[in-house]
Amino acid sequence: MIKKILISQPHPATEKSPYFDIAKKHNVEFVFHPFIRVEGLAPREFRAQRVNVLDHTAIVFTSRHAIDHFFMLCKEMRVAIPDDMKYFAVSEAISLYIQKYVQYRKRKVFFPTTGKFADLLPLMVKHKTENYLVPLSDVHNDELKNQMDQHNLKHTECVMYRTVANDYPADQPFDFDMVVLFTPAGVQSLIKNVPDVKDRGIRLVSYGKATELAIEEAGLPLELAAPTPQAPSITGSLDLYLTKENGEG
């Protein structure tokens, strides 16, 4: 019987989260603790990459983390972003987040309707004379670089933030029946925090193919891989699983 579930993400910002509906419906307890956290590079670490932000005329944002750490790092280095800087975001939600740091109406912001980088590229090609800067995490692959190279876009990738393990509090019992993981780094952090996780019989849930593969490569048993055709969200997947597990419906 599943009674206590660890969700390796921050606590929801609102009590209207589906997690709380599931908790009431199935009489389970959710505990929220991210196994990873993101921290920005220090100015001296960034300067070691020998990248000059103001050499570029457009910034490509792939996440809110990238936006946060780009503007924070520029502030720390006292780099004044010119008003004519262009911004290219992989989704409308990410593009709107730029408003946290700049007056949106005065900026030139571009994004695709699909939320996919492949669909952002045609917009970038229309601005082929731009020199693009792509802020990234220390954990990334060359997919963006290769796609931009294929379209002959002038660009520079740079690391502006890193993903680090966020240890589970040592003074709190790790007495969960199930753990939900969202990233490969989260899988590694779980193993670091709970080396005997396999022997404890804790049921592991993955969200996304990369996380699913990381669990399998670590030799850990995977109880549930989300999303599924029946449930595209992690909460929907958990709801269906608990309904079946508890013999409901």
Image: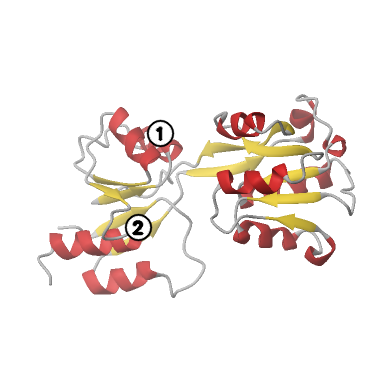
151 vs 131, nearest the viewer = 151
Quadrant where the C terminus sits is bottom left
115 vs 82, nearest the viewer = 115
Identified at 57% across, 28% down, the residue is 142
What secondary structure is marked by label 1? helix
Let me know if residue 175 appears in the view.
Answer: no
Image x and y of residue 172, in percent = 37, 50
Mark positioned earlier in the residue sequence (1 or 2): 1
Image x and y of residue 209, in percent = 36, 41
Image x and y of residue 100, in percent = 73, 62
Mark 1 lies on residue? 188
On the rendered structure, is 214 left or right of 131?
left
Mark 2 lies on residue? 234
Amino acid type at circle 2 is Ile
* Distance from Cα at disc 1 to Cα at disc 2: 20 Å
What secondary structure is marked by label 2? helix
On the rendered structure, is 195 left or right of 166?
left
18 vs 10, nearest the viewer = 18
Assess disc 1: are there few (<14), some (14-19) or many (≥20) residues with their C-alpha within 10 Å of its C-alpha.
Answer: some
Q: Residue furthest left?
A: 247
Identified at 28% across, 56% down, the residue is 229
On the rendered structure, is 83 left or right of 59?
right
Quadrant where the N terminus sits is bottom left
Amino acid type at circle 1 is Gln
Between label 1 and label 2, give the one nearer the viewer: 2
On the rendered structure, is 134 left or right of 3?
right
The image quadrant of residue 93 is bottom right
128 vs 109, nearest the viewer = 128
Let me know if residue 134 appears in the view.
Answer: yes
Image x and y of residue 61, in percent = 67, 47
Q: Kindly identify which numbered label has been placed on residue 78.
A: none
Where 49 sits versus 241, above or below? above
